[in-house]
């Protein structure tokens, strides 16, 4: 699932391609939107809210999409070959005179009134990349259930919007806590919230995410994706386990030496 920084980059790319121009083609390929036509409307802006994309168009309408695991938006110029996938995976086509944005495998695609955007994003917590970032509110939400495992609390978009599985594992490592440590027992949770914001901010313009401050290939992350390999800090083998409610489990990476607290093996 994309992290908030990659969704932010997608929103910026779509905004640069579409904002300020009028749509000459609109093709929304989901049954409930089959008769909807945005052609002739100007695109005001495309923004990210956590992991949600909001394309606001003339007439007070917003095209809302969410990428989840497989979705993607690609931007093409006239005559350029579309390479995002086969035609049957296309869910949306938005064209201006100069660019075409194509949404592939979009699991969520809705058209709603801009005034009603809260119905799809109003539940989200503060967005570390949003103009209204509120660290104090994010901290209060994160700590609202002190007994909840830290990893689950970080992934809950109602606490911090935009934290995904990569940042969950990396933040827990950098905090020196296993993802199963009760969030209320986390040392300096305010610094953890600030770190989350700094990491997303630092990576929002990078195509290769870096948490270690070392941009070299295979040196960029502390533990994520390093199952069975030595911890960069202490050399202990990095472990993995699923974490989360049944049906929503996400693979989690951690170092049993550098991170204190319970694990799936210790309970």
Image: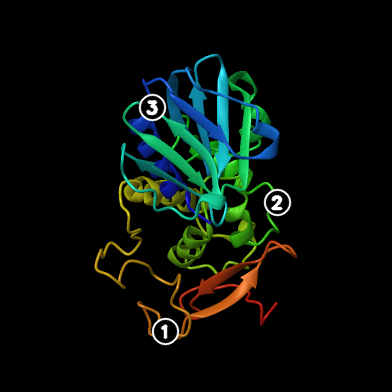
Q: Name the residue: 25% across, 63% down.
A: 215
For mark 2, give the secondary structure: loop
Query: Residue most toward the right?
Result: 246
Residue indicated by mark 3: 96
Above or below: residue 230 compared with residue 182 = below
Question: Which residue appears farthest toward the top when viewing the image?
Answer: 59
Of tags 2 and 3, the one toward the viewer is 3
| On screen, residue 257 above or below 142 | below
Split into 4 quadrants, where in the image is the C terminus? bottom right
Q: Are marks 2 and 3 in contact (CB under 8 Å)?
A: no
Q: Position of residue 69 (x, y in %)?
A: 56, 57
What residue is shown with label 2? 145
Q: How busy is the neighbourhood of tag 1: few (under 14 within 10 Å), some, or many (20 plus)? A: few
Residue 89, how many percent across, how many down?
55, 51
Residue labelled with disc 1: 229
| Percent of width and height locating residue 169 | 50, 65
Task: Report the front residue among 87 and 70.
Answer: 87
Q: Position of residue 222 (x, y in %)?
A: 39, 70
Label 2 neighbour load within 10 Å: few <14, some 14-19, many 20+? few
**In whole angstroms, how far apart are the C-alphas of marks 2 and 1?**
33 Å
Residue 194 shows in the view: no
């Amino acid at each position: 699932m994309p992290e908030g920084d990659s969704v932010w980059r997608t929103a910026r790319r779509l905004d640069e391609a579409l904002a300020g121009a009028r749509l000459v083609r609109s093709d929304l390929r989901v049954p409930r939107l089959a008769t909807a036509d945005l052609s002739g409307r100007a695109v005001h802006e495309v923004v990210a809210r956590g992991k949600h994309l909001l394309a606001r168009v003339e007439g007070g309408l917003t095209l809302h999409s969410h990428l989840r695991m497989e979705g993607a938006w690609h931007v093409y110029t006239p005559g350029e070959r579309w390479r995002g996938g086969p035609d049957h995976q296309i869910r949306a086509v938005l064209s201006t005179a100069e660019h075409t944005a194509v949404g592939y495998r979009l699991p969520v695609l809705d058209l709603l009134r801009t005034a009603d955007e809260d119905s799809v994003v109003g539940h989200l917590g503060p967005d570390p990349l949003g103009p209204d970032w509120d660290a104090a509110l994010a901290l209060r939400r994160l700590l609202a259930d002190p007994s909840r495992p830290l990893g689950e609390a970080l992934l809950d978009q109602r606490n911090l919007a935009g934290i995904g599985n990569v940042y969950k594992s990396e933040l827990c490592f950098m905090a020196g806590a296993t993802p199963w440590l009760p969030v209320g027992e986390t040392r300096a949770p305010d610094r953890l919230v600030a770190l989350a914001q700094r990491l997303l901010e630092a990576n929002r313009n990078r195509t290769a995410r870096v948490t270690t401050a070392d941009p070299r290939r295979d040196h960029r992350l502390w533990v994520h994706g390093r199952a069975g390999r030595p911890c960069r800090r202490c050399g202990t083998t990095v472990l993995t386990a699923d974490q989360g409610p049944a049906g929503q489990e996400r693979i989690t990476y951690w170092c049993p030496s550098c991170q204190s607290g319970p694990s799936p093996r210790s309970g």
